[in-house]
Structures are given as structure tokens and as C-alpha cells.
Image (spheres, coloured by chain):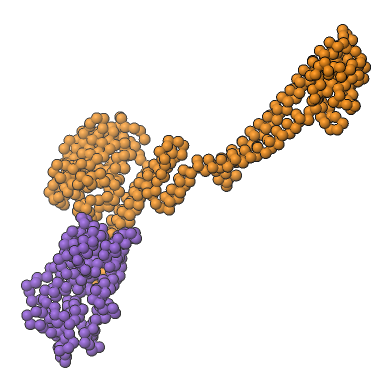
Chain colours: A purple, B orange
């Protein structure tokens, strides 16, 4: 899951980034409105966290223009002002949810999860493919009731595969949603992480759930 | 009376005044009327008496007179509404006109006595059947001798009836007139007070929070028109200051929320799981920075609000401004040391101003600190102090990021910071220049900001010299 954070205050942007990264999301931070709009339009993000008080282009304007240009990504707005009309304008401009500063980190993460879940169409929050179950809240992964220990990146990759179960995912799609902008696309990091995941999930099992589609990418599905 | 509306009160006042006028009018009308009628009756009696006396004189006076003869010769005596009596010198009736018939109207004692003395008398009496009469008794003398007393009388019935009718008319007309004018007064008071209602309604809407409300007035310059336009002016000014206060508190809460968000967010993040000691240190240091920022904002806000309330006491003494400038320049050098920013003294003339040493020091330090803060590495800040036009003129020029012309008006506004300033110096509070402006103004000086041609900022402070300074 790849998230764009548009926030001008460097320290706020920094702790939001670290919190999201600890939850194994890929995070890009953008310090002003106009480049935030630019990125939102050109990168296929899964969620945008948008501060409303921005230098240059105000947050509400960023949101309006992004929606006008067809960006469907869920948007969580952050506002320093608790005034109702600010939030109303944000929501009317196309935001999906809001948080008022100062906010609790756990609430930010819960709202991010909720927005991602809503976008993914899984109402309970639990993701399941065959007997693999992933809980995005506790970040617990089990197969056949047996708990699996995953690293942050492995977890992020698995979550992305499971959210898109049954669909072929190209390497560039995986790059876009699991890694942030600092990622060097020329390496074979994706293949390496896929093999790590296979070791933990499929190795020694009857059914292999993560399959390679030659020439295209990967798919996760239960039927062989 | 306290709770009744002005409309009711106006109408009541107006009604009472009118009622008083009506009563006075009615009473005097009645009095004048009855007096005029009485006089008219008396005059006609007088006239009749004169005619009768003339007639009698032509016939010879005497104790026995035949009325019929008289009335035949002089038909005017036989006027229907008057009767005649002629008394002998002893007061006995000798002859009387037929319209009296046999009724007895004796001569009263006072008129008989007056007649003996040669005076005429008028009197009003009640006839036996209740008819009011007016009587005139005139003595007829020959030499000193009283020969006859002529009495002419008439009924007052028609006069009284007329007066009665007048009274009835007044009884009916006065309350009617009062009622009609009360109605008119009520209507007029309502009309006159309509703009007052409009003002009340507008004030209520404004009280409900709609500051855009104004009173629509006809373009009149009367009392109500003046009240309305005064009211509108007042609301206009209130709206502006209300908006400023709202902006101010919104800005203040924003400025305080940012450090709060950072400390809360960073702390919560740190506590989510066990971390290295170094990580905690980083968080604590960052938090300390934010706490410092918040306490600076709170201090400066408190200072400004105390300044607004006039609670800041100033100790005005002659201050050697040139010494102060040199001293602060040394401090600015230290501030800029790390980034190699030189503070250069260009011209320093001796200037003495009447002022508070501590506040002037704060002013200089604030301005120089800003200049250094917004300068790029290796740039210089220039400082000069000259005398011009009876004022000490302090110029602080930097070559830093500068301020766009459209923002220059607002740099002295509280919490106002340009986006560049925010990005450049996150630690600023946005209150420093507001404080500078306040300090300059309590010293009766001026401060202005212009961009230099090289893109930096140039602050000019003018303070009156001590000799010409207004003592505070």
C-alpha cells in the first residue's frame, strides 16, 4: 500500500511518515500543494493524507483539482482548525475522512486502514486467500491457523497481493504500491521479496498460492 | 410606565396634552359664549328700556299709564320676547305689558333701593314656573323726584337652551376629537418609530452572529437617519475588529496546534514499541524544541495582550541610541557567526531619544535577529543610525529572502508570516514584528518595511529625538 503525505511542517510530515512506514506502507512526503497535486495525478497511490493549510496551493484546491482530473484515491485531510466549515469544505471538495490536529497516531493509522479497506471492498478488514488470513489491524498473518512471522516489507507485499487476489500484478504495479519513490526499479528486489514470501507461505505446503505468470508478473490465488 | 412601549407613551402623552387643551378650550368657549349671550340680552334690555322711556316721556309720566295706548302708538314696545312693568315711586305696579298677564314679579328690595338712589340694576331671577328671567330696572326721575321705575324683562330660556346645546356639543365632540387624534397619534408614532424597529431587528440579527446585516435607511438626514447611519458605521467597525479577533484567535490556535501536534505525534510514535535510547533522545530533543516554541508564543501573546490593555509600564528616560545600536550589533555578530553573516555598521550619528531602554533594546534585537535569520549564508546585514528632520532614523537592511510587495502591508500583523518565512525559519512565532511595531508606536515613532532592489528587506524606524519627544 503506497501513501502520499502532503504536509508542509517537516516534523509533522516526518512522524506521519515513520508511523506509516512502521505499518509497512510505502510513503512519499510532499511539502507543498502544487507538487502534491502533481504527484497525486501521476502516481497511483492507495491513500493520500492531505494537510489543508499548505503554502502555495491550499489543500482544498489541491483536492478539487485532483478530483476534477479523475484521481479516485481515498483522501484523508488533516486540519489544524477545528472549525466546522473547514472540514465541511474539505469533505465537499472530495475528501473521504478528516482528522483534526493534534491527533492520536493510532487514530491516524486506524482511519488509514479503514479508508484502504473501504477502497479494497473488504468490509471486515480481514483478508483471506485459501487458508491464509491477514489481519491488517494486528498485522498478524496465519496459514492454516499457524502464525507466520513476516518482515515489514514482506508483510506489505503480501497485503498488496492479497488485496488484489486473483489478479495478475506486474512488477511495476507492485513497485508503485509497495515501494516508495526512493526505490530503484532496476534491481530485482521484487523477485527477491517474492521468493522470501514463498519460503514462508508456500514452502512445504500442498498448494502454492503465489504463482509466477511468465512474462507478466505474479498472482495470488487459491485454485492451482 | 417603564415597561410600556415608546409608542404607547407617546400616544398617551399626546392624548393627555390634547385632552387638557380640549377641556381648556371647551371651558373658555362656554364662558365666552355665555358671557356674550348675557351681554347681548342686557344690551337688548337696555335698548328696550331706552325706547320705552322715550315713549313714556312723550306721553307724560304719571302714576297711571295705559299700556294699550302705548303699544298702539309704539309697536316696538310690544315685542314678544320682552315684557314691561312700570312701578310707581313707592314700588307698586302701576302698569305692565300684556305678556306678563297677571303674574306677580315684584320689585326686589335691592333694585328699589338702587332706583331711589337713581341707579339702574340688572338682575337674574327664577320665575315661579321655573323660567329664568333677566330684569332691568331703570328709575325715571323728574328733577330729584322719582316718578316711575321702568322694568324691562326677558326670558333667558332660549339663551340657556343655546348654551346647553353648546355644552352637549362639546361633551360629544371633545371625546370624539380626542379619540380620533389618539388614533392618529398612535399611527404617527408607529410610523415615526418604524426605523427604530428596523434597527432593533438588524441588531437582533447581528446579535445572532450575522455581521453582514446593515440597516436600510431612506436617504434622510433626520434623527433616525443619523442614528441608523451611526449604527451602521459602528457595526462596520465592529465587524472589522470582530473579524480581526477571529483571525487572530484562529491564527493563535493554529500556531499552538502545530507544536502540539508534533509533540503528541512524536511521543505517541515513540511509545508504540520499545526503541533504542538514541531514538528516545531524538524525540525528547525535538519535543523540547517545540515546548520552547510554545512557551515563546505564549510569552509573546501575553506581552501583546498586556500591551493592548495598557498594562506594560515603561520607564521613559533619555537613551543614547547610538550606544545601544553598537551594543546590539555585537550581539548580532554572534548570532550570525555560525552562518558567516556579518552585521556592518555604516553610519552611526549620536542620537538621544526619550524611551524605555529595555524595550528599545528588544526592538533592535528583534529586527537584527530577523535580518540575520532571513539572510543566506555569507551575506551581510547593514545598519545605520542618522538624524533627519528632528528624528533619529535607524535603517536595517538585509539581502535575504525579502518579502513580496503584496505581503509588505501585513508583515506587522500578528501571526502573519509569509510562506517563505515559514519554510525558512520554522522556529519563528509570527509575533516579533507586531511587538516591534508596538514598541515603536509607544515611543511615538514610525516603522516601515520596504524591499531592497536586491530582493532583501529594509526596515526603517524613526524615533523623535529626546528634545522634541513628547513626554509620557
Residue A166 location in percent, x, y?
17, 82
Report the number of numbered marks.
0
Front one among B312 and B456: B456
Front one among B220 and A82: B220
Residue A9: name its quadrant: bottom left
Q: Is residue B372 left or right of residue B445?
A: left
Residue B133 location in percent, x, y?
82, 27
User: Is residue B457 something one can see in this rendering?
Assistant: yes
Front one among B439 and B19: B19
Residue at the image point whose x is 61% and y is 36% from the top: B18
Q: Residue furthest top?
A: B143
Q: Is residue B206 left or right of residue B407?
A: right
Q: Vertically, is B69 above or below A132? A: above
User: Is residue A150 something one can see in this rendering?
Assistant: no
Residue at the image point whose x is 24% and y is 74% from the top: A119
Q: Vertically, is B120 above or below B462? A: above
Q: Vertically, is A18 above or below A210? A: above
Residue B391 location in percent, x, y?
26, 32
Residue at the image point whose x is 84% and y is 27% from the top: B125
Residue B144 location in percent, x, y?
88, 8
Q: Is residue B141 left or right of residue A218?
A: right
Residue at the image point whose x is 71% and y is 36% from the top: B168
Amino acid at each position: 500500500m503506497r501513501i502520499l503525505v502532503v504536509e508542509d511542517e517537516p516534523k509533522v510530515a516526518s512522524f506521519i511518515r515513520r508511523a506509516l512506514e512502521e505499518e509497512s506502507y510505502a510513503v512519499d512526503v510532499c511539502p507543498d500543494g502544487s507538487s502534491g497535486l502533481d504527484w497525486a495525478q501521476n502516481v497511483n497511490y492507495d491513500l493520500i493524507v492531505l494537510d489543508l493549510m499548505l503554502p502555495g496551493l491550499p489543500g482544498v484546491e489541491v483536492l478539487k483539482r485532483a478530483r476534477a482530473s479523475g484521481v479516485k484515491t481515498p483522501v484523508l485531510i488533516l486540519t489544524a482548525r477545528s472549525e466546522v466549515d473547514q472540514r465541511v469544505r474539505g469533505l465537499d471538495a472530495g475528501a473521504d475522512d478528516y482528522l483534526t490536529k493534534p491527533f492520536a497516531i493510532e487514530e491516524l493509522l486506524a482511519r488509514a486502514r479503514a479508508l484502504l479497506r473501504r477502497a479494497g471492498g473488504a468490509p471486515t478488514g480481514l483478508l483471506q486467500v485459501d487458508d491464509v488470513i491477514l489481519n491488517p489491524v494486528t498485522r498478524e498473518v496465519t496459514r492454516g491457523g499457524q502464525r507466520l512471522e513476516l518482515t515489514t516489507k514482506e508483510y506489505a507485499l503480501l497485503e498488496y497481493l492479497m488485496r488484489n487476489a486473483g489478479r495478475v500484478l506486474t512488477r511495476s504495479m507492485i513497485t508503485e504500491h509497495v515501494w516508495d519513490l526512493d526505490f530503484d526499479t532496476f534491481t530485482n528486489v521484487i523477485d527477491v521479496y517474492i521468493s522470501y514470501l514463498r519460503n514462508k507461505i508456500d514452502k512445504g505446503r500442498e498448494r502454492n498460492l503465489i504463482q509466477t505468470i511468465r512474462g507478466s508478473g505474479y498472482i495470488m490465488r487459491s485454485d492451482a | 410606565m417603564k415597561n410600556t412601549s415608546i409608542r404607547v407613551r407617546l400616544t398617551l402623552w399626546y392624548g393627555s396634552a390634547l385632552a387638557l387643551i380640549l377641556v381648556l378650550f371647551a371651558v373658555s368657549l362656554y364662558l365666552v359664549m355665555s358671557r356674550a349671550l348675557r351681554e347681548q340680552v342686557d344690551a337688548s334690555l337696555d335698548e328696550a328700556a331706552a325706547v320705552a322711556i322715550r315713549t313714556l316721556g312723550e306721553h307724560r309720566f304719571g302714576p297711571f299709564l295705559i299700556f294699550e295706548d302705548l303699544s298702539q302708538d309704539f309697536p316696538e314696545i310690544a315685542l314678544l320676547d320682552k315684557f314691561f312693568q312700570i312701578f310707581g315711586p313707592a314700588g307698586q305696579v302701576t302698569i305692565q305689558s300684556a305678556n306678563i298677564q297677571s303674574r306677580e314679579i315684584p320689585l326686589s328690595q335691592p333694585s328699589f333701593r338702587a332706583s331711589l338712589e337713581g341707579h339702574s340694576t340688572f338682575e337674574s331671577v327664577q320665575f315661579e314656573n321655573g323660567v329664568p328671567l333677566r330684569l332691568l330696572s331703570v328709575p325715571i326721575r323728574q328733577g330729584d323726584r322719582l316718578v316711575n321705575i321702568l322694568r324691562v324683562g326677558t326670558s333667558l330660556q332660549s339663551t340657556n337652551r343655546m348654551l346647553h346645546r353648546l355644552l352637549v356639543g362639546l361633551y360629544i365632540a371633545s371625546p370624539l376629537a380626542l379619540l380620533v387624534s389618539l388614533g392618529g397619534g398612535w399611527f404617527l408614532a408607529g410610523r415615526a418609530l418604524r426605523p427604530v424597529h428596523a434597527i432593533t431587528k438588524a441588531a437582533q440579527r447581528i446579535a445572532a452572529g450575522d455581521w453582514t446585516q446593515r440597516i436600510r435607511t431612506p436617504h434622510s438626514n433626520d434623527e433616525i437617519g443619523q442614528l441608523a447611519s451611526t449604527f451602521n458605521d459602528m457595526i462596520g467597525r465592529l465587524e472589522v475588529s470582530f473579524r480581526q479577533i477571529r483571525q487572530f484567535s484562529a491564527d493563535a490556535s493554529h500556531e499552538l496546534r502545530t507544536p502540539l501536534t508534533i509533540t503528541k505525534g512524536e511521543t505517541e510514535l515513540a511509545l508504540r514499541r520499545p526503541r533504542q535510547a538514541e531514538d528516545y533522545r531524538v524525540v525528547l530533543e525535538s519535543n523540547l524544541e517545540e515546548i520552547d516554541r510554545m512557551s515563546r508564543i505564549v510569552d509573546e501573546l501575553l506581552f501583546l495582550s498586556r500591551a493592548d490593555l495598557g498594562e506594560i509600564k515603561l520607564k521613559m528616560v533619555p537613551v543614547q541610541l547610538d550606544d545601544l545600536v553598537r551594543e546590539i550589533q555585537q550581539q548580532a555578530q554572534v548570532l550570525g557567526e555560525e552562518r558567516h553573516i556579518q552585521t556592518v555598521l555604516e553610519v552611526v550619528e549620536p542620537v538621544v531619544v526619550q524611551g524605555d531602554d529595555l524595550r528599545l533594546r528588544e526592538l533592535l534585537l528583534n529586527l537584527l535577529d530577523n535580518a540575520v535569520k532571513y539572510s543566506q549564508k555569507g551575506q551581510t546585514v547593514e545598519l545605520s543610525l542618522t538624524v533627519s528632520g528632528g528624528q533619529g532614523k535607524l535603517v536595517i537592511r538585509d539581502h535575504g529572502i525579502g518579502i513580496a510587495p503584496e505581503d509588505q502591508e501585513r508583515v506587522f500583523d500578528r501571526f502573519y508570516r509569509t510562506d517563505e518565512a515559514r519554510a525558512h525559519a520554522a522556529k519563528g512565532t509570527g509575533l516579533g514584528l507586531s511587538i516591534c511595531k508596538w514598541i515603536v508606536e509607544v515611543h511615538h515613532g514610525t516603522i516601515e518595511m520596504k524591499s531592497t532592489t536586491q530582493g532583501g528587506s529594509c526596515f526603517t524606524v524613526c524615533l523623535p529625538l529626546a528634545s522634541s519627544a513628547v513626554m509620557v
